[in-house]
């Protein structure tokens, strides 16, 4: 089974009211942990690579590792560029074998975002590759911010319709209150479901994407902190809010921070308890298992993607 695009995955996810997890990968252990979980859960899967990951590991290493994962597992896996900054990086990933790319023009004006997205869509579609774009800003906003400020940051539903029609993009990342990293909310975590419902109603059967969707489970924060880390005050998106989003047209949920926390907590614990160990396999093996457990939990209890191959 070769790498697949997200087309069929999203169609099934939309109809089944669940979301497919898109997990960031940077090395072999992360890829193996995620793929083992997908196999265990019989779940569809997107592996995504950021510009930083490509710089760290090199495109060719990640490509070959993912090809090995496909061959070894027999699973239908989509390989996606996360947050492509411009046309050039998208082109490079399309030419280099990715089946999906994100062009993130959210920092540009509406018209410039449309122009760059359209250019990537044209190039990608001619080569059988699908494209995700982003409209709205993922910056975290304060609890007491007024409605006008929120409107300036979050995705405008009418603009979303125009954007999708004019670009021909295959999926759209929207801003409804999530943000990247481990510190997403200062007060009570909230997502703008009213806005999400509006977008979904205006764009029926169209896959939406939620970035910045780690939950930052307290037990992993505690574990990191217990063994010498300091991620005090970290707070993510509660799992029930993610489940709700998956019922409302969100077909792809991006998770990176939760994998980082699980992996780092495991490495910290192992080295603390085994100060004499200096064989990387001894601490990377439990770290890979920690990734697997985290991803299996997401598929089963949060995304609802288990048993949907
Ligand atoms: O949204 C960004 C992802 O978490 C990737 O992060 O750019 O540090 O690889 P990175
Ligand atoms: P988190 O930082 O919440 O895991 O989000 C990851 C993401 O959106 C990658 O694009
Ligand atoms: Zn993101």
Image (cartoon, grey):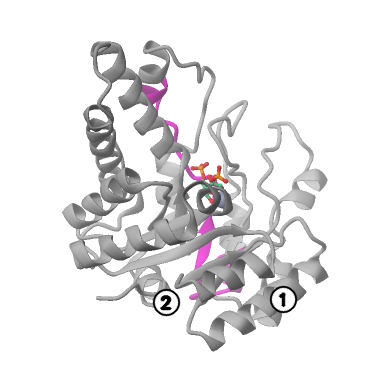
Report the quarter where the C terminus lies.
Answer: bottom left
Helix, strand or loop at label 1? It is helix
Residue 253 quadrant: bottom left
Q: Is residue 103 magenta?
A: no
Report the quarter where the N terminus lies.
Answer: bottom left
Q: Does label 2 or label 1 sit earlier along the sequence?
A: 2
- Mark 2: is the Cβ under 8 angstroms from ligand 2? no
Q: Which residue is mark 1?
A: 162
Residue 139: x and y in percent read 69, 42
Helix, strand or loop at label 2? It is helix
**Which marked residue is nearer to the observer: mark 2 or mark 1?**
2
Q: In screen coordinates, is 39 left or right of 127?
A: left
Between residues 94 and 238, which one lies in front from this camera angle?
94
Q: Is residue 214 magenta?
A: yes
Q: Is residue 238 above or below residue 192?
A: above
Q: Is residue 295 above or below residue 70?
A: above
Residue 20 quadrant: bottom left
Residue 17: x and y in percent read 37, 63
Q: Residue at x 40, y 69 (%)?
A: 14
Res. 19 visible in picture: no
Residue 48: x and y in percent read 45, 57
Badge 2: residue crowd in 10 Å (few <14, some 14–19, many ≥20): some
Q: Residue at x 58, y 70 (%)?
A: 92
Instruction: Please provide the residue range marked out in magenta.
Output: 199-221
Residue extending farthest left = 40
**Residue 248 tag number:** none
Q: Is residue 229 above or below residue 259?
A: above
Q: Which residue is mark 2?
A: 7
Q: In screen coordinates, is 66 left or right of 160?
A: left
Residue 269: x and y in percent read 30, 18
């Amino acid at each position: 089974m070769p790498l697949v695009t997200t087309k069929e995955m999203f169609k099934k996810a939309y109809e089944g009211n669940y979301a497919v997890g898109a997990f960031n990968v940077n090395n072999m252990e992360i890829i193996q942990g995620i793929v083992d979980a997908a196999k265990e859960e019989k779940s569809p899967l997107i592996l995504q690579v950021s510009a930083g990951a490509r710089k760290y590991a090199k495109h060719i290493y990640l490509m070959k590792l993912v090809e090995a994962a496909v061959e070894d597992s027999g699973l239908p896996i989509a390989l996606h560029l996360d947050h492509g900054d411009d046309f050039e990086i998208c082109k490079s990933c399309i030419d280099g074998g990715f089946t999906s790319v994100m062009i993130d023009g959210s920092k540009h004006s509406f018209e410039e975002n449309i122009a760059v997205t359209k250019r990537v869509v044209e190039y990608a579609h001619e080569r059988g590759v699908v494209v995700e774009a982003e409209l709205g800003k993922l910056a975290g906003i304060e609890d007491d911010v007024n409605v006008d400020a929120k409107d300036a940051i979050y995705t405008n539903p009418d603009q979303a319709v125009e954007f999708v029609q004019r670009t021909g993009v295959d999926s759209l990342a929207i801003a409804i209150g999530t943000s990247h990293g481990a510190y997403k909310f200062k007060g009570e975590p909230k997502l703008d479901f009213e806005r999400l419902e509006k977008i979904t109603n205006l764009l029926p059967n169209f896959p939406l994407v939620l970035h910045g969707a780690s939950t930052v489970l307290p037990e992993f924060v505690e574990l990191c902190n217990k063994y010498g880390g300091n991620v005090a005050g970290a707070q993510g998106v509660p799992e029930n809010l993610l489940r709700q989003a998956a019922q409302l047209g969100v077909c792809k949920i991006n998770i990176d921070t939760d994998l980082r926390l699980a992996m780092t907590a495991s490495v910290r614990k192992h080295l603390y308890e085994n100060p004499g160990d200096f064989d990387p396999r001894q601490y990377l093996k439990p770290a890979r298992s920690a990734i697997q457990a985290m991803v299996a939990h997401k598929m089963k209890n949060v995304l609802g993607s288990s048993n949907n191959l």
